[in-house]
Amino acid sequence: MGKSLLLFKDIDAFVFDFDGVLTDNIVFLDQNGVESVACSRADGLAFDVLHKLRKPAYILSTENNPVVTARANKLKVFALQGVSNKVEGINKIAEKEGFSLQNVLYVGNDLNDYQVMQLCGHTACPADSHIAIKGISDIVLKTCGGKGVVRELLEDVLSLDFIEILYKK
């Protein structure tokens, strides 16, 4: 971890790349050209924690794909898709929602995340990220993309107690 202790209260919003972060970066393609991907249910539970704590979360993806829409809808998060320039995309979200990029935690894995990660105050990446992304990330997670990245980030790095948050009154 490149920076000192990161606290949940210091983060105004979480922004996640889709492919390679919420998926394992593998795409399945059937004979009709229909794509599908695998996502971790552990991350679904992590998004439930973010909702319960009223912490905004977004998906920012260069892909414009129905699988991104379907997963975002299931997670109940806003997805900005088809974004060729992620810097413009995150600036658009921050301006609309009124938060500073210094208080955003961005999770990316590949070179198309490089510039946007340099703008955000906090950054993380999955274990199987591109070496350049690992080099600029504050947090390099132990989990690979699509295997519960958000869960590890919230539970292990930010020390959130899912049982306390989700199941105790």
Image (cartoon, grey):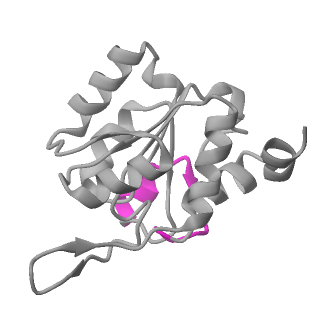
The image quadrant that residue 81 belongs to is top left
**Of residues 129 and 145, the one drawn nearer to the viewer in this rendering:** 145
Q: Could you tell me residue 18's position as x and y percent? A: 36, 55
What residue is drawn where x is 32% and y is 30%? 90
The image quadrant that residue 92 belongs to is top left
Q: Could you tell me residue 37's position as x and y percent? A: 34, 72
Is the residue 79 above or below the residue 13 in the image?
below
What residue is drawn where x is 41% and y is 17%? 97
Asked if the stretch drawn in magenta spans residue 140, the answer is yes
Q: In which quarter of the image is the C terminus?
A: top right
What residue is drawn where x is 40% and y is 67%? 23
User: From this viewpoint, which residue is outermost toward the bottom?
Assistant: 31
The image quadrant that residue 15 belongs to is top left
| In the displayed structure image, the side of residue 123 where residue 130 appears, left or right | left
Is the residue 9 above or below the residue 133 in the image?
above
Asked whether the viewer can see residue 40, the reply is yes
| In the displayed structure image, the side of residue 76 where residue 92 appears, left or right | left
Asked if the stretch drawn in magenta spans residue 144, the answer is yes
**Of residues 111 and 65, the one drawn nearer to the viewer in this rendering:** 65
User: From this viewpoint, which residue is outermost toward the left?
Assistant: 32
Magenta part of the protein: which range? 131-146
Q: Could you tell me residue 153's position as x and y percent? A: 63, 53
**Of residues 109 and 39, the one drawn nearer to the viewer in this rendering:** 39
Is the residue 34 above or below the residue 149 in the image?
below
What residue is drawn where x is 36% and y is 65%? 130
Asked whether the viewer can see residue 1, the reply is no
